[in-house]
Amino acid sequence: MLNIFSGARKQIFLTFGPWVLIKVFGEPAPTIAKLWIVASAIGIVFQPQLGKLIDRFGERAILMTNALLLIGVCIGYGFAHQMPLARPVQLVYVCYVLDNVLFATGIARATYLDKIADQESDIHASLSLGVSIDHAVSMSLPALGGLLWVKHGFSSVFVAAAVLAALNLAAASLIRTPRRMASDGSVVSGGQSSPEP
């Protein structure tokens, strides 16, 4: 489920996020390149911290926070032009950068799999299947999103994306990981332990 929603989210934002900047706000390609550079620079600082946040709060908290932020990003992309802002495009800039930075939270899915796999040999096969699911979903959505855009306007694409992010939030809330022992013998919950059987 997490990979299905990841694939849907990836293609919606890779395809339609930049298209809002270009088609709706008339931004040139250099602006998008600059935003991508800013997002990459933030990512250099954010990604090492993300690992620490996963260790401290657990995968469920990180993936749920990601989903909540994505709902906000969807609202920004879809409705910035209707908000009483001096330059609504600046909100879309923030959405674009935040969206790109949040792609890194996908690592929480991998660390979650590592914690729940019965055998180490299951991890690589499961990750490969997850990538295949991700790609299958992400390749099927641009046409549907394009139809929504043409028929109901670009905001409808991001309303649909917000619904997907809400479903992702619900899926992430179901994450449970087994308790594990720390090196000092104490029980480490990772923020979302299920009771021991």
Image (tube, grey):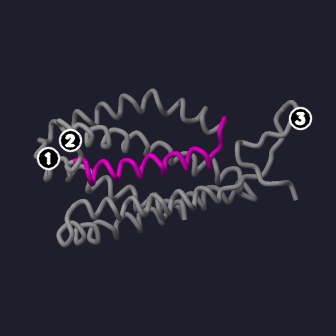
Q: Looking at the image, is mark 2 or mark 1 earlier in the sequence?
A: 1
Label 2 sits on what residue type?
Pro
Q: CA distance from mark 2 to mark 1?
A: 9 Å
* Residue 14 percent coordinates (x, y): 30, 53
Residues packed near mark 1 inside 10 Å, few (<14), some (14 to 19) or many (20 plus): few
Of residues 13 and 125, the one nearer the viewer is 13
Could you say where residue 118 lies in the image, as x and y percent from the top left?
75, 59
Label 3 residue SS: loop
Look at the picture and state if 34 lies above or below 145. Answer: above
| Residue under label 3 | 185
Residue corresponding to mark 2: 88
Image side of residue 87 versus residue 163, left or right: left
Q: Point out the frontmost of discs 1 and 3.
A: 1
Tell me residue 187's x, y (percent): 84, 40
Q: Mark 2 against mark 1, which lies toward the viewer?
A: 2
Q: Residue at 56% x, 60% y: name it.
A: 170
Residue for badge 1:
25
Where is 151 relative to 75, above or below?
A: below
Which region of the structure is painted magenta?
56-80
Q: Disc 2, disc 1: CB below 8 Å? A: yes
**Does dot 2 land on a helix, a strand or a loop?**
helix
